[in-house]
Image: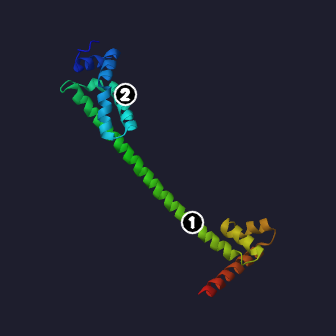
Amino acid sequence: MRMSTGDNELAGWAAAGDADAFRALLERHYDGIFRLAFRFTGNRADAEDVAQDVCVLLADRLGAFRGDAKFTTWLYRIVINACRDRARRRATGQRATADFAAVEDLRRAADAERGEQLAWVRDMLSRFTEDIRETAILVLGEQLSHGEVAMILGVRESTISWRMHELRKGLKQMADDDR
C-alpha cells in the first residue's frame, strides 16, 4: 500500500476484507487512538486497553463507515464511545464493589451481634447444670424434638420436657433478678 492512499479508500478496502488495508489503517491511526484514549482515561493501562478494544471493534465496524465524514472523525467517535463504555463499566464495577462492601459490613455487624448474643446465651447456660445445657443445645440450638433428644441422651422424653421447664424457670428468674 502506498502511503498516499487516503483513509476512506483504505477503509473501503479493509471493509471488503483486505487485511493489508486494515493493517495500514491501524499503523496509521493507532498512536492517535491511544493518545485520545489516554486523554479521556488519564491512565496508560486503560488507554492501552481502550486502544486494543477499538482495534478489535474497528474490524467489525468498518462496514458501517459510509465516508460521509473524515475517517478520523468517525474513528475518534468510536474511541470516545469506547472510553465512555469503559467508564460506565468501571462505575458499575465500583458500585457493585461498594454494594458488596456495604453488604459485607452488614454481615459483619450481624455476625458481631450474633456473637454477642451467643456469648450471652453461653453465659446464661453456664449457670445451669450440664444435663440442662446439653438438653438446651439440642432442643433450642439444633431444633430437635424432645423425643429425638431423649434418644440421643438416653433418657425418657418426660425428662427432656422437665429439663426444658427448669431452663425456662431459671431464665425467668435470672431476668427478674436483672430488673
Q: Quadrant of residue 138?
A: bottom right
Report the residue at 32% width, 19% height from top.
22
Q: Residue at x 66, y 67 (%)?
A: 141
Q: Say which mark, if any, is on residue 150.
A: none
Secondary structure of the residue carrying numbered label 1: helix
Residue that protrudes farthest toward the top in the picture: 2
Q: Position of residue 50 (x, y in %)?
A: 36, 34
Q: Amino acid at mark 1?
A: Ala
Left or right position of 65 against 117: left
Q: Report which quarter residue 16 is drawn in.
A: top left
Q: How many marks?
A: 2
Q: Is residue 13 above or below residue 139?
A: above
- Report crowding for label 1: few under 14, some 14 to 19, many 20 or more residues within 10 A (C-alpha): few
Looking at the picture, how far across and down is residue 37, in whole percent? 32, 35
Badge 2 is on which residue?
56
**Which sits in the foreground, 15 or 79?**
79
Render colour scheme: rainbow
Please tell me whether residue 94 is drawn above or below residue 155 in the rendered image. Answer: above
Give the residue type that dot 2 points to: Val
Q: Nearer the viewer, residue 90 or 16?
A: 90
The N terminus, quarter of image = top left
Query: Which one is in front, 134 or 150?
Result: 134
Residue at position x 77%, y 73% from top?
131
* 139 left or right, relative to 40: right
The disc placed on residue 112 is 1
Quarter occupied by the C terminus: bottom right
Above or below, 173 against 80 in this view is below
Q: What residue is shown at x 33% (from left), y 31% (from top)?
A: 34
Query: Could you tell which of marks 1 and 2 lies nearer the N-terminus?
Result: 2
Nearest the viewer among 94 and 168 is 94
| Element under disc 2 | helix
Would you call the spot at circle 2 few (<14 residues within 10 Å), some (14-19), or many (20 or more)?
few
